[in-house]
Image: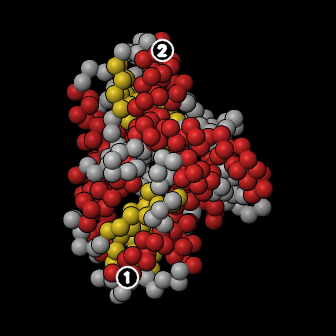
Amino acid sequence: MKRAVVLMNLGSPDSTEVPDVKRYLDEFLMDGRVIDKPWLFRAMLVKGIIVPFRAPKSAEAYKSIWTKEGSPLIVLSEQLARALDQEVEEPVVIAMRYGTPSPREAFDKLLQAHPDLKEVLLIPMYPHYAMSSYETAVEYAKEQHAEGRYPFRLEYIKPYYDNAEYLEALCESIRPYLDTDYDQILFSYHGVPERHIYKGDITQQHCLKKEGCCDTPSAAHQYCYRHQCWTTTKEVARRLGIPDGKWGFSFQSRLGRDPWLQPYTAQRLEELPKEGVKKVLVACPAFISDCLETLEEIAEEGKESFVHAGGESFTMIPCLNVHPLWVRAMATWVEGFRAGNTDMLQRGSAHELVPKGSIMDII
């Protein structure tokens, strides 16, 4: 076997026990692309404040969504790998940015089973480019590939926020829910600090600096998370025929006091009932697999906030998970890769193009 596929997702604690959650949060939050502060400051903040106080609460949150098989994100990722494995001739395994299995574990597993391996295609489970999700996953996989001195070449799929196959799968996963009686569908994306958007602006003069920047053509859009989320939202609304006024756009999972992308999902869910939106649907396109941020933060906390504010009906639309059209979309990319098509491959990253010495450099 000369080629193989790795599906790379965020990761999960090994269990809901506090020590495992602490270990996971420490690895996650010490990533310089997640909390982009100098190492010493980051270590004091993460190890001294955030993890000790957050881990017990996070452990309880994980307990509320944990299944008999384990972490939903891991279980769903494994199911997706098996489904894709049935569609393509290449072997498919999973890897996680944090926790297990690591990219190196995935590479070792593939190479042990297929000593003649020549190419590995990495498919990040992130449709949109952000330094704290897509970029950190790809760069980590590249680092582990280099450190392991593997004999095969590593390639990776570019962000697919506007890819036709991805959008078709996303739309069809949402379509059945539009047949219900609803007032608005809210598209909630994982938030990032505004400074991440500035840092990823390879022009250094466009993102969040111009009115309507996300709709104004710019080279910055190749790495702009907000533009890509906005593009996905508008395209899904257009394809599904959702009229203006019946869809909204927001960002969740804020951490810290620095300004993050707005509007905030938690705030919007409290405001919507006062605006006459009593029946809401919530979709989370930034996530491929349902996880803590969708199953607990949205389906549990978000629903409670919405109902407490006067809402009557709250429905969280599941992520793509193992939707047949999503599996088929990835199979199409793998088949193209096998045939030598490089259209879906990513070349370079934002941090390589931002001017060196700029205050926007990634720390």
Establish if 321 lies above or below 250: below
Measure the alpha-carbon separation of dots 2 and 1: 55 Å
Quarter location, residue 234 = top left
Q: Residues within 10 Å of mark 1 (few under 14, many from 20)?
A: few
Residue 253 x %, y %: 54, 38
In contact (CB < 8 Å): disc 2 and disc 1: no
Q: Residues within 10 Å of mark 2 (few under 14, many from 20)?
A: some
In the image shown, does 5 or 349 lie closer to the viewer? 5
Image-based side of 170 in relation to 122, left or right: left
SS category of the residue bearing label 1: helix
Residue under label 1: 112
Residue ID at (30%, 57%) = 80
Image-based side of 190 in relation to 114, left or right: right
Residue ID at (21%, 65%) = 86
Quarter location, residue 337 = bottom left
Earlier along the polypeptide chain: callout 2 or callout 1?
1
Residue ID at (42%, 17%) = 307
Q: Residue 7: in sight, yes or no? A: yes
Residue 282 x %, y %: 39, 31
The amino acid at mark 2 is Ala
The amino acid at mark 1 is Gln
Establish if 347 lies above or below 205: below
SS category of the residue bearing label 2: loop
Residue under label 2: 309
Q: Residue 167: in sight, yes or no? A: no
Q: Nearer the viewer, mark 2 or mark 1?
A: 1
Image-based side of 35 in relation to 331, left or right: right
Position of the N terminus, as image quadrant, is bottom left
Residue 261 x %, y %: 59, 37
Residue 249 x %, y %: 47, 32
